[in-house]
Amino acid sequence: MHRGGVLAAILIAALVGLSLLAGLIADLADPLNFPNIRSPQEAGKIFYGWTIGVEILVLVIGGFSRISSVLVNERKAGLWDSNRLTPLKPSQLVVGYWFGSPLREFYMAAILAGTGFFIVLLGKLPMTLWLGTQILIFSTALFFGLLAVIVGLVLQKPQAGIAFIALLFFLQMPSFTLPKFLLTNFLLPVYGIANLFHVSDDSGNSYSVNSWSGLPEIFNLPVYPILLSLILQTLIGIFLWRAAIRKTANPFRPSLFRWEAVAIFGILLFTQHGLIWNLWHGQIPTGNHRYDNYEPLMAIVHCGTIFLAIIILAAAGLQLEIVRLKILRLKIKNLGAIFPESSVALAFVLAAVAGAILLTQFIHSTDSDSWKIYFIALGNLLTFFLIFSLLLEFCRLRHKRRALGFVALWLFILCILPFILAAVFTNATFARLSLLAPGVVALANPADENLNNLLGIVAAHFGIVILLFLGWRRQWKQLLARAV
């Protein structure tokens, strides 16, 4: 423990915790030095909020970084393969890295949790605040720890894990503007923790009128935030656990089976649309009707759907090495046997799931424009999923190790570059050509858009799908010819 630097980390955590505890005691002893704090409960919530902020930083972010970097480094050094050759089961190896790697962070978080307990007592706050927040922090640490195991088994550089968690928290920031309606505030239980602070108010109203308090609703069914976060983390955590064991047993197998990928996609998308369903009850505003304060919400959900599909298609896509072995072993000579293995088939399934769930937002609509918006959004999702899956496999077949770089280049050209050109030439027409534009524009501001033009743009995107399919087909035929 001393050799690993755990003792120094424990002392640092203890000093931070004692400093916060001393600050609360000083405030309670002489409130005149803190004129903005009106009561011991308010002071307790402020100092406890700082405490759990440091605890989350240490346990969730620090633990994720430690697990992913340890796995990547040991894979590069060959220690991971030697561990796999021992009599230990894959599940035992996963548990060892899951709990063993962030041991220092667990000790630090335990010190901070204990300090938080005394702060809650001195601040005369309810024990449910301490217990609820600690349960959410611990469950989130376990969830992100499993995610870190997957990331460490897939990525090649230790810094990539830090970049991944930084991107994840960056994408979390926009959800703070609409806290009760976006899934990320429950998967990463920001809303549940903030809601527990509101529950501890002395106002007599258990849920004050505030965007960060109250019960969220899934298709008009109220649910406690802490319960929703725990259910989501548990369901997705089960699939992450299966993927980690599978990847440990055989590194050449895909991280996710197809049915698992579809299940994760469906669970997250169903929950997200359930959270916002109560705003319009299946009747999206069109024409002269407005979204009021929730105008960007459907566009944000649309972009989130695309981002989630990209991750799933990349994780559950075909492994070229496995397909090459299958071609040689079974003497495959046609593309008919390749298609079921391809992520293109998965793209169709994901688009069907997304379309079925998106339909719930339009199910009671009677305006013809609302159905145009639906088919624009659905067509946009289908074309984007197909373009990404075809592009990913084309680049993997043609460019091999440089594939991800070329995928990123083409996605930049097809999605981001039109917005840059629109800004440079001050012409919004360029922005409409982006792969992201039709669905986002139709859902964000349907009253001010020509929906027929957006339908035409979606049809043009199907032309890109056809061109990519021809290139994809040519690359596979070349691979089959070389194998035979």
Image (cartoon, grey):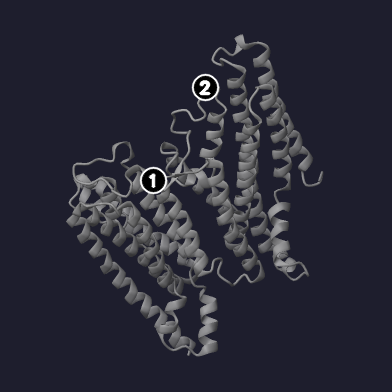
Q: Which mark is residue 203?
A: 2
Count residues near mark 2 (Cα–Cα under 10 Å), then give few for <14, some for 14-19, many for 20+: few
Amino acid type, callout 2: Ser
Image side of residue 408 versus residue 456, left or right: right
Name the residue that disc number 1 marks.
276
Asked where in the image residue 53 lies, by quadrant, the reply is top right
The front one of 54 and 305 is 305
Element under disc 2: loop
Element under disc 1: helix
**Front: mark 1 or 2:** 2
Image side of residue 483 versus residue 27, left or right: left
Amino acid type, callout 1: Ile
Asked where in the image residue 248 lies, by quadrant, the reply is bottom right
- Whole-percent x and y of residue 171? 46, 46
Find the residue positioned furthest to the right.
2
Report how far apart the C-alphas of labels 1 and 2 lie in the structure: 28 Å
- Whole-percent x and y of residue 380? 30, 59
